[in-house]
Amino acid sequence: MAPKLLLHGCCAHCTAYSFKYWQEQGFAVSVYWYNPNIHPFMEHQSRLEAMRKLSAEMGFELITEPSYHMAEYFKNVSANVDGRCRICFDMRLGQTAAYAAGHGYEYFSSSLFISPHQKHQDAVCSAEALAKETGVRFAYADLRKRYSDSRHITKPLDLYRQQYCGCVYSEYERFGKPNSPA
């Protein structure tokens, strides 16, 4: 029987190749949606709907966290905006690892590890610490060189495609005026 891996899905585009990769490595993969960092709420819902469509197309089990936890997210990151990415990784991967521990998964990972736009080493450090804390093994692969492969999988599916990481801070960095105060 294949070992069970819970893959945190940050978005449909990053999840497509990540799911395929872990499945090809011999894992029974389920995808877990927990992303309280994505704002505004309708952006979160658009990305979740894209993930549901991808799940139907690729045939994976999609587990969605029913709570959005927006207030908790802002409480956690507002005190340390410069360190927000690590805090965000701890929150999202922590929820994933906890779910994995409570539901019989032997491994967890994330589609974050395919994105060239994430603070990769911070996400790795977060996942490694959470693996020790929860006892669920962290399955790691640096898939950043396969980012375009994931986009090639999803482009024909005509899924919603976001223009920023998800948090309002990254949205501002992407679309804000270059010399505007943060």
Image (cartoon, rainbow, N blue to C red):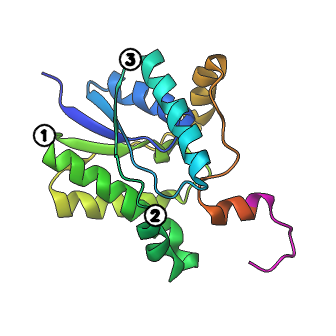
What residue do we see at 44% from left, 18% from top? 56
Q: Quadrant of residue 62?
A: top left
Q: Is residue 113 visible?
A: yes
Q: Quadrant of the N terminus?
A: top left
**Quadrant housing residue 63:** top left
Q: Amino acid at mark 1?
A: Gly
Whether residue 47 sits left or right of residue 98 in the image: it is right
Q: Which residue is mark 3?
A: 59
Whichever of callouts 2 and 3 sits on the residue coming sooner in the sequence is 3
Residue 138: say if magenta.
no
Mark 3 falls on what kind of element?
A: loop
Q: Which residue is mark 1?
A: 104
* Disc 2 target residue: 88
Where does the image place residue 108, in percent across and percent down from the top left? 28, 44
Q: Position of residue 21 (x, y in %)?
A: 41, 28
- Judge whether residue 125 can be spotted in this image: no
Question: Label 3 is placed on what type of residue?
Answer: Gly
Task: Report helix, strand or loop for mark 2.
Answer: helix
From the top left corner, tell me how far across and down residue 99 is, in percent: 23, 48
Alpha-carbon distance for marks 2 and 1?
24 Å
Q: Earlier in the sequence, mark 3 or mark 1?
A: 3
Could you say where residue 176 lies in the image, as x and y percent from the top left? Answer: 81, 64
Residue found at x 19% / y 64%: 133
For marks 2 and 1 on the same chain, the one whose residue lies earlier in the sequence: 2
Mark 1 residue element? loop
The mark found on residue 133 in the picture is none
Using the image, determine if residue 122 lies above or below residue 97: below
Against 84, residue 175 (above or below) is above
Q: CA distance from mark 3 to mark 1?
A: 20 Å
| Segment tinted magenta in the rendering | 174-182
